[in-house]
Amino acid sequence: MKTAEVITPPRAGTGLYRSTPGVILVFAVLLAALTWGGHRPLPSAAITGLLLTAFCVQMVFDREDEQAVELFRRLRLPALLFIGVLIWAAVQNLPLSLSMAHPAWAALPAEASTGTGALSVDPDAGWAGIMRLSGIAAAVWIAARMDAKVARLTLVASVTVGVCIASYGLAAWAAGANPLTGPPAYPGVVTGTFINRNAFACFAALAALAAFSLAFQHSSMRVSFGSAGVILVVALILSGSRAGAAAFAAGFVVLIVLMQPRAGRMWRLGLLAVVLGLLVIA
Protein backbone atom coordinates (compact mmCIF):
# COMPACT_ATOMS: atom_id res chain seq x y z
CA MET A 1 0.00 0.00 0.00
CA LYS A 2 1.40 3.33 -1.04
CA THR A 3 1.91 5.93 1.58
CA ALA A 4 0.79 9.44 0.81
CA GLU A 5 3.62 11.79 -0.11
CA VAL A 6 4.06 14.73 2.19
CA ILE A 7 4.64 17.96 0.30
CA THR A 8 6.59 20.50 2.29
CA PRO A 9 6.56 24.10 1.13
CA PRO A 10 9.92 25.75 0.50
CA ARG A 11 11.41 27.35 3.59
CA ALA A 12 11.31 31.13 3.57
CA GLY A 13 14.66 32.63 2.75
CA THR A 14 15.76 30.02 0.19
CA GLY A 15 16.14 30.16 -3.55
CA LEU A 16 14.66 33.15 -5.28
CA TYR A 17 13.43 34.70 -2.01
CA ARG A 18 16.96 34.99 -0.62
CA SER A 19 18.04 36.95 -3.70
CA THR A 20 15.45 39.68 -3.09
CA PRO A 21 17.60 41.96 -0.85
CA GLY A 22 20.51 41.72 -3.27
CA VAL A 23 18.33 42.66 -6.23
CA ILE A 24 16.97 45.64 -4.27
CA LEU A 25 20.55 46.67 -3.47
CA VAL A 26 21.51 46.59 -7.15
CA PHE A 27 18.45 48.65 -8.05
CA ALA A 28 19.15 51.20 -5.29
CA VAL A 29 22.79 51.69 -6.29
CA LEU A 30 21.95 52.14 -9.95
CA LEU A 31 19.08 54.47 -9.03
CA ALA A 32 21.57 56.62 -7.13
CA ALA A 33 23.81 56.77 -10.19
CA LEU A 34 20.91 57.92 -12.36
CA THR A 35 19.59 60.55 -9.92
CA TRP A 36 22.44 63.03 -9.57
CA GLY A 37 24.43 60.66 -7.39
CA GLY A 38 21.60 60.51 -4.86
CA HIS A 39 22.53 63.96 -3.54
CA ARG A 40 19.07 65.48 -3.87
CA PRO A 41 16.73 65.07 -0.85
CA LEU A 42 13.98 63.01 -2.51
CA PRO A 43 16.22 60.46 -4.31
CA SER A 44 18.42 60.20 -1.23
CA ALA A 45 15.44 59.42 1.02
CA ALA A 46 14.02 56.92 -1.48
CA ILE A 47 17.34 55.10 -1.87
CA THR A 48 17.93 54.97 1.89
CA GLY A 49 14.40 53.65 2.39
CA LEU A 50 15.01 50.90 -0.18
CA LEU A 51 18.28 49.88 1.44
CA LEU A 52 16.85 49.77 4.96
CA THR A 53 13.84 47.79 3.75
CA ALA A 54 16.13 45.31 2.00
CA PHE A 55 18.23 45.08 5.16
CA CYS A 56 15.17 44.19 7.25
CA VAL A 57 14.23 41.46 4.75
CA GLN A 58 17.81 40.17 4.79
CA MET A 59 17.81 40.01 8.61
CA VAL A 60 14.64 37.91 8.51
CA PHE A 61 16.40 35.46 6.19
CA ASP A 62 19.59 35.47 8.29
CA ARG A 63 18.07 34.98 11.75
CA GLU A 64 18.65 31.20 11.67
CA ASP A 65 21.53 31.11 9.20
CA GLU A 66 24.74 29.83 10.78
CA GLN A 67 26.95 31.59 8.22
CA ALA A 68 25.25 34.91 8.92
CA VAL A 69 25.68 34.43 12.67
CA GLU A 70 29.38 33.69 12.22
CA LEU A 71 29.82 36.72 9.96
CA PHE A 72 28.12 38.93 12.51
CA ARG A 73 30.46 37.64 15.21
CA ARG A 74 33.44 38.63 13.10
CA LEU A 75 32.02 42.08 12.47
CA ARG A 76 31.02 42.83 16.07
CA LEU A 77 33.83 45.31 16.72
CA PRO A 78 33.36 47.34 13.48
CA ALA A 79 29.60 47.27 14.09
CA LEU A 80 30.00 48.64 17.62
CA LEU A 81 32.34 51.39 16.39
CA PHE A 82 29.87 52.30 13.65
CA ILE A 83 26.98 52.44 16.12
CA GLY A 84 29.12 54.70 18.30
CA VAL A 85 29.59 57.07 15.35
CA LEU A 86 25.82 57.18 14.76
CA ILE A 87 25.14 57.88 18.44
CA TRP A 88 27.69 60.72 18.52
CA ALA A 89 26.24 62.18 15.32
CA ALA A 90 22.76 62.04 16.87
CA VAL A 91 23.99 63.76 20.05
CA GLN A 92 25.31 66.66 17.96
CA ASN A 93 21.83 67.23 16.55
CA LEU A 94 19.96 67.30 19.86
CA PRO A 95 18.67 70.67 21.16
CA LEU A 96 20.87 72.29 23.81
CA SER A 97 21.00 75.56 25.66
CA LEU A 98 22.86 78.35 23.86
CA SER A 99 25.67 78.18 26.39
CA MET A 100 26.45 74.59 25.31
CA ALA A 101 25.57 74.90 21.62
CA HIS A 102 27.75 75.92 18.70
CA PRO A 103 28.60 79.67 18.86
CA ALA A 104 26.80 80.22 15.56
CA TRP A 105 23.44 79.75 17.30
CA ALA A 106 24.12 82.63 19.69
CA ALA A 107 24.91 84.88 16.74
CA LEU A 108 21.39 84.52 15.30
CA PRO A 109 19.17 87.64 15.42
CA ALA A 110 16.73 87.71 18.34
CA GLU A 111 13.70 87.25 16.07
CA ALA A 112 15.24 84.14 14.48
CA SER A 113 16.49 82.54 17.70
CA THR A 114 14.45 79.97 19.63
CA GLY A 115 16.65 80.14 22.71
CA THR A 116 18.16 76.74 22.00
CA GLY A 117 20.80 75.41 19.64
CA ALA A 118 22.85 72.28 18.98
CA LEU A 119 26.45 71.20 18.67
CA SER A 120 25.80 71.03 14.93
CA VAL A 121 25.15 74.19 12.95
CA ASP A 122 22.70 72.27 10.74
CA PRO A 123 20.86 69.49 12.65
CA ASP A 124 18.59 68.73 9.68
CA ALA A 125 21.62 67.91 7.54
CA GLY A 126 22.99 65.89 10.44
CA TRP A 127 19.89 63.69 10.65
CA ALA A 128 19.99 63.23 6.86
CA GLY A 129 23.63 62.18 7.15
CA ILE A 130 22.75 59.60 9.79
CA MET A 131 20.12 58.14 7.47
CA ARG A 132 22.62 57.95 4.61
CA LEU A 133 25.21 56.25 6.83
CA SER A 134 22.59 53.76 7.98
CA GLY A 135 21.74 53.00 4.36
CA ILE A 136 25.41 52.45 3.54
CA ALA A 137 25.79 50.06 6.48
CA ALA A 138 22.71 48.16 5.28
CA ALA A 139 24.23 47.92 1.79
CA VAL A 140 27.48 46.52 3.20
CA TRP A 141 25.68 43.74 5.07
CA ILE A 142 23.46 42.85 2.09
CA ALA A 143 26.50 42.74 -0.21
CA ALA A 144 28.33 40.47 2.23
CA ARG A 145 25.37 38.06 2.19
CA MET A 146 24.80 38.26 -1.57
CA ASP A 147 24.83 34.99 -3.52
CA ALA A 148 26.97 34.40 -6.61
CA LYS A 149 24.18 34.89 -9.17
CA VAL A 150 23.14 38.27 -7.80
CA ALA A 151 26.79 39.29 -7.47
CA ARG A 152 27.33 38.59 -11.16
CA LEU A 153 24.13 40.50 -11.98
CA THR A 154 25.53 43.41 -9.97
CA LEU A 155 28.73 43.46 -12.03
CA VAL A 156 26.94 43.29 -15.39
CA ALA A 157 24.35 45.91 -14.40
CA SER A 158 27.04 48.24 -13.05
CA VAL A 159 29.03 48.00 -16.27
CA THR A 160 25.96 48.51 -18.47
CA VAL A 161 24.67 51.54 -16.58
CA GLY A 162 28.20 52.86 -16.07
CA VAL A 163 28.96 52.84 -19.79
CA CYS A 164 25.66 54.59 -20.54
CA ILE A 165 26.39 57.31 -17.95
CA ALA A 166 30.00 57.68 -19.11
CA SER A 167 28.93 57.91 -22.77
CA TYR A 168 26.35 60.54 -21.87
CA GLY A 169 28.97 62.43 -19.87
CA LEU A 170 31.44 62.35 -22.75
CA ALA A 171 28.76 63.57 -25.17
CA ALA A 172 27.77 66.40 -22.78
CA TRP A 173 31.45 67.29 -22.34
CA ALA A 174 31.94 67.44 -26.12
CA ALA A 175 28.79 69.55 -26.53
CA GLY A 176 29.80 71.88 -23.71
CA ALA A 177 26.46 71.55 -21.86
CA ASN A 178 24.89 69.00 -19.54
CA PRO A 179 21.07 69.22 -19.64
CA LEU A 180 20.60 66.90 -16.64
CA THR A 181 22.87 68.64 -14.14
CA GLY A 182 22.54 72.21 -15.40
CA PRO A 183 25.44 74.69 -15.20
CA PRO A 184 28.42 72.62 -14.03
CA ALA A 185 30.24 73.30 -10.79
CA TYR A 186 33.39 72.15 -12.58
CA PRO A 187 33.40 73.57 -16.13
CA GLY A 188 35.17 71.53 -18.77
CA VAL A 189 35.08 68.17 -16.99
CA VAL A 190 32.96 65.02 -17.28
CA THR A 191 30.45 64.38 -14.50
CA GLY A 192 27.79 62.32 -16.31
CA THR A 193 24.57 62.33 -14.30
CA PHE A 194 26.42 63.28 -11.09
CA ILE A 195 26.69 66.72 -9.53
CA ASN A 196 30.09 66.11 -7.95
CA ARG A 197 32.96 65.10 -10.22
CA ASN A 198 34.63 63.06 -7.47
CA ALA A 199 31.43 61.04 -6.94
CA PHE A 200 31.27 60.37 -10.68
CA ALA A 201 34.94 59.38 -10.73
CA CYS A 202 34.39 56.85 -7.92
CA PHE A 203 31.39 55.34 -9.70
CA ALA A 204 33.27 55.19 -13.02
CA ALA A 205 36.26 53.57 -11.30
CA LEU A 206 34.11 50.87 -9.72
CA ALA A 207 32.25 50.22 -12.98
CA ALA A 208 35.56 50.04 -14.88
CA LEU A 209 36.97 47.53 -12.40
CA ALA A 210 33.79 45.48 -12.79
CA ALA A 211 34.17 45.60 -16.58
CA PHE A 212 37.80 44.47 -16.49
CA SER A 213 37.04 41.68 -14.00
CA LEU A 214 34.32 40.37 -16.33
CA ALA A 215 36.74 40.66 -19.25
CA PHE A 216 39.24 38.49 -17.37
CA GLN A 217 36.62 35.86 -16.55
CA HIS A 218 34.83 35.59 -19.92
CA SER A 219 37.12 35.12 -22.90
CA SER A 220 34.18 35.20 -25.34
CA MET A 221 33.17 38.68 -24.11
CA ARG A 222 36.67 39.96 -23.43
CA VAL A 223 36.67 42.59 -26.17
CA SER A 224 33.20 43.91 -25.25
CA PHE A 225 33.86 44.22 -21.54
CA GLY A 226 37.40 45.48 -22.15
CA SER A 227 36.11 48.21 -24.47
CA ALA A 228 33.50 49.19 -21.87
CA GLY A 229 36.27 49.47 -19.28
CA VAL A 230 38.35 51.73 -21.52
CA ILE A 231 35.35 54.05 -22.12
CA LEU A 232 34.83 54.30 -18.36
CA VAL A 233 38.51 55.01 -17.74
CA VAL A 234 38.53 57.78 -20.37
CA ALA A 235 35.47 59.37 -18.74
CA LEU A 236 37.12 59.01 -15.33
CA ILE A 237 40.26 60.79 -16.55
CA LEU A 238 38.25 63.61 -18.10
CA SER A 239 36.47 64.11 -14.78
CA GLY A 240 39.69 65.66 -13.53
CA SER A 241 39.46 63.77 -10.23
CA ARG A 242 43.00 62.84 -9.20
CA ALA A 243 41.77 60.89 -6.19
CA GLY A 244 39.39 58.89 -8.39
CA ALA A 245 42.17 58.09 -10.86
CA ALA A 246 44.52 57.04 -8.07
CA ALA A 247 41.85 54.84 -6.47
CA PHE A 248 41.18 53.16 -9.81
CA ALA A 249 44.89 52.56 -10.43
CA ALA A 250 45.27 50.92 -7.01
CA GLY A 251 42.15 48.79 -7.55
CA PHE A 252 43.31 47.76 -11.00
CA VAL A 253 46.68 46.53 -9.72
CA VAL A 254 44.86 44.44 -7.09
CA LEU A 255 42.52 43.10 -9.78
CA ILE A 256 45.48 42.08 -11.97
CA VAL A 257 46.99 40.14 -9.08
CA LEU A 258 43.71 38.43 -8.13
CA MET A 259 42.80 37.49 -11.70
CA GLN A 260 46.25 36.20 -12.66
CA PRO A 261 45.25 32.51 -13.07
CA ARG A 262 42.23 33.40 -15.24
CA ALA A 263 43.76 35.69 -17.83
CA GLY A 264 46.56 35.26 -20.33
CA ARG A 265 49.86 36.94 -19.56
CA MET A 266 49.93 39.04 -22.75
CA TRP A 267 46.31 40.16 -22.22
CA ARG A 268 47.05 41.29 -18.67
CA LEU A 269 50.22 43.13 -19.62
CA GLY A 270 48.60 44.78 -22.64
CA LEU A 271 45.57 45.94 -20.70
CA LEU A 272 47.76 47.17 -17.83
CA ALA A 273 49.89 49.14 -20.31
CA VAL A 274 46.81 50.75 -21.92
CA VAL A 275 45.24 51.76 -18.61
CA LEU A 276 48.47 53.09 -17.09
CA GLY A 277 49.19 54.94 -20.35
CA LEU A 278 45.82 56.67 -20.16
CA LEU A 279 46.48 57.63 -16.54
CA VAL A 280 49.90 59.05 -17.43
CA ILE A 281 48.38 61.11 -20.25
CA ALA A 282 45.85 62.49 -17.77
Image (spheres, grey):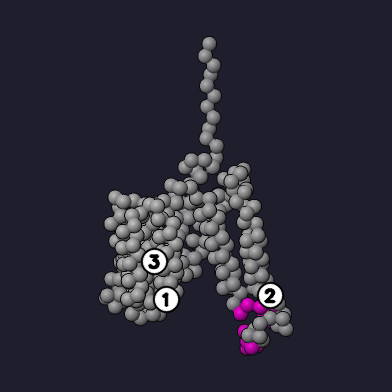
Location of mark 2 (residue): 95
Residue 43 appears in the rendering: yes
Quadrant position of the C terminus in the picture: bottom left
Quarter of image, res 166 = bottom left
Tag 3: residue type? Answer: Ala
Does the magenta-highlighted stretch encompass residue 117?
yes
Mark 2 element type: loop
Task: State how far apart marks 2 and 3 are (Cα).
Answer: 40 Å
Q: Which residue is mark 3?
A: 204
Vertical position of residue 212 compared to residue 180: above or below: above
Residue 126 x/y as whole percent: 59, 72
Per the image, label 3 sits on a secondary structure element best described as helix
Nearer mark to the viewer, of 1 and 2 = 1
Amino acid tagged 1: Arg
Who's the residue at 41% across and 64% down the image? 252
Q: Is residue 38 above or below residue 259?
A: below
Q: Tell me the tag on residue 242.
A: 1
User: Going from the N terminus, do you reach mark 1 or mark 3 first?
Assistant: 3
Q: Which residues are magenta?
A: 107-121
Residue at position x 50%, y 57% in the image: 50
The residue nearer to you, when weighing 37 against 182, is: 37
Is 229 positioned to the left or the right of 206 in the image? left
Instruction: Answer few, some or many: residues within 10 Å of disc 1's Cα (few below 14, many 20 plus, some between 14 and 19).
Output: some
Report the residue that reaches farthest toward the front. Answer: 265
- Magenta span: helix, strand or loop, mainly? loop
Q: Residue at the spot x=65%, y=57% of the render?
A: 76
The mark nearer the N terminus, 2 or 3, is 2
Residue 232's disc number: none
| Callout 1: SS | helix
Local crowd size for mark 3, using a 10 Å CA cut-off: few (<14), some (14–19), many (≥20):
many
Residue 247 pos. (x, y %): 45, 69
